[in-house]
Image (tube, rainbow, N blue to C red):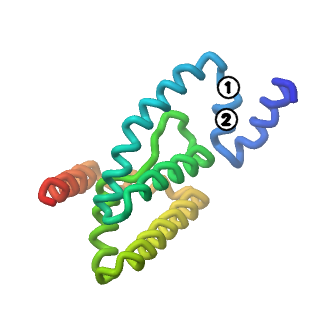
């Protein structure tokens, strides 16, 4: 497929797969910088994802899967080419708090419930994306977000 045909194809699929918009304008000279950024992101993301999985009470490798699947999902459906998506400390704490009580100390049941929670959130995100509900984020005030982040930070410090 020639270059012009490739750009037309990418432009036609951009309605369904948002990265098609910026892929059509991608320049080969950017590849070196993008590879360096990818290596730096991996150097940050790998230890952080291992720590967040442990914080959630899950095996460390689950954090790597969370980063990979979240990143792949966003790469296919996200609109920004400069964004890293993955687990956070707040999500890890919420999973640990909610799933720990339900599982009742059973490690296998804990992993199953945490996986189900992850798939439920992914389904909700997909439905929200299809219905274009991202506008609702504007209804959350900055003070609530700051309080949530401060609470998550204090919880991590105390545990």
Specify whether 3 is left or right of 32: right
Residue 41's label in the rendered image is none
The front one of 27 and 69 is 69
Residue with the mark numbered 1: 25
Quarter of the image with the C terminus in it: bottom left
What distance separates the C-alpha of mark 1 from that of mark 2? 7 Å
Q: How many marks?
A: 2
Quarter of the image with the N terminus in it: top right
Give coordinates of residue 92: x percent, y percent. Answer: 32, 60
Answer above or below: position of 62 versus 101.
above
- Name which quarter of the figure residue 123 lies in: bottom right
Residue shown at 28% from the left, 59% from the top: 55
The front one of 145 and 113 is 113
Residue shown at 50% from the left, 70% from the top: 120
Residue shown at 47% from the left, 30% from the top: 39
Most extreme residue toward the left, as rendered? Answer: 158
Residue with the mark numbered 2: 21
Specify whether 135 is left or right of 52: right
Answer above or below: position of 125 versus 146.
below
Give coordinates of residue 111: x percent, y percent. Answer: 42, 72
Alpha-carbon neighbours of circle 1 within 10 Å: few (<14), some, or many (≥20)?
few
Give coordinates of residue 110: x percent, y percent. Answer: 38, 75
Circle 1 — which element? loop
Q: Are marks 1 and 2 in contact (CB under 8 Å)?
A: yes
Alpha-carbon neighbours of circle 2 within 10 Å: few (<14), some, or many (≥20)?
some
Give coordinates of residue 51: x percent, y percent. Answer: 31, 51
The front one of 107 and 77 is 107
Circle 2 — which element? helix
């Amino acid at each position: 497929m020639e270059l012009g045909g490739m750009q037309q194809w990418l432009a036609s699929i951009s309605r369904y797969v948002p990265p098609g918009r910026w892929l059509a304008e991608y320049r080969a000279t950017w590849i070196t910088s993008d590879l360096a950024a990818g290596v730096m992101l991996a150097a940050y993301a790998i230890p952080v994802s291992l720590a967040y999985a442990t914080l959630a009470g899950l095996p460390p490798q689950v954090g790597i899967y969370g980063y990979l699947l979240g990143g792949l999902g966003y790469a296919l459906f996200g609109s920004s080419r400069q964004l890293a998506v993955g687990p956070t400390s707040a999500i890890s704490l919420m999973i640990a708090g909610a799933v720990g009580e339900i599982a009742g100390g059973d490690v296998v049941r804990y992993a199953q419930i945490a996986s189900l929670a992850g798939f439920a959130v992914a389904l909700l995100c997909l439905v929200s994306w299809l219905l274009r509900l991202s506008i609702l984020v504007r209804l959350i005030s900055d003070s609530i977000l700051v309080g949530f982040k401060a609470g998550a930070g204090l919880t991590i410090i105390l545990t």
